[in-house]
Amino acid sequence: MSTAKKWSNVAVAMESALGSAITITAISKASEGVVTATNTLSNGDFVKLSVQGMFQLDGRVARVSSVSGASFTLEGVDTTLFDTFHNRHGEQNHLWHIDHHCHHAQRIGRRFRFH
């Protein structure tokens, strides 16, 4: 018989809105990819990527770290083996800041209550 697993101290982040599109001008191939884009992001923000120029990132959500001027790191996203980023005429390479709220789950019997 298997042992039941219990959750504790669970936090769930839910997307409540996306900010305006930010154009990506470069993404490095590195153990943690570095994105260049004029932005006002802060460490710990989350972004949603729409990337044709490095398709492996398309549709991914990543946490922002090491913000410095117009560049920042995609925390924990290894782009070393991804295709080389390109920004050809007409391609759409954007990201959006995700406005999110963190909700904590409290287990009540078999159900969870979020607050």
Image (cartoon, grey):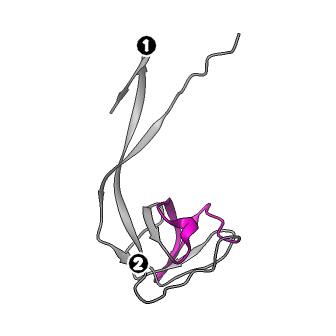
Placement of the N terminus among the 4 image quadrants: top right
First along the sequence among labels 2 and 1: 2
Say which element carries label 1: loop
In magenta stretch: residue 1? no
For label 2, the residue is 92
In the depicted structure, whether residue 108 falls above or below residue 83:
above
Left or right of residue 78, residue 59 in this image: left
Three-letter amino acid code of the residue under disc 2: Gln
Placement of the C terminus among the 4 image quadrants: top left
In magenta stretch: residue 65? yes
Say which element carries label 2: loop
Three-letter amino acid code of the residue under disc 1: Gly
Q: Residue at x 70, y 70 (%)?
A: 81
For label 1, the residue is 109
Q: Which residues are magenta?
A: 53-80
Q: Residue at x 66, y 65 (%)?
A: 78
Q: Nearer the viewer, residue 55 or 34?
A: 55
Residue 45 spot, x, y in % from top left: 43, 62
Residue 99 spot, x, y in % from top left: 33, 57
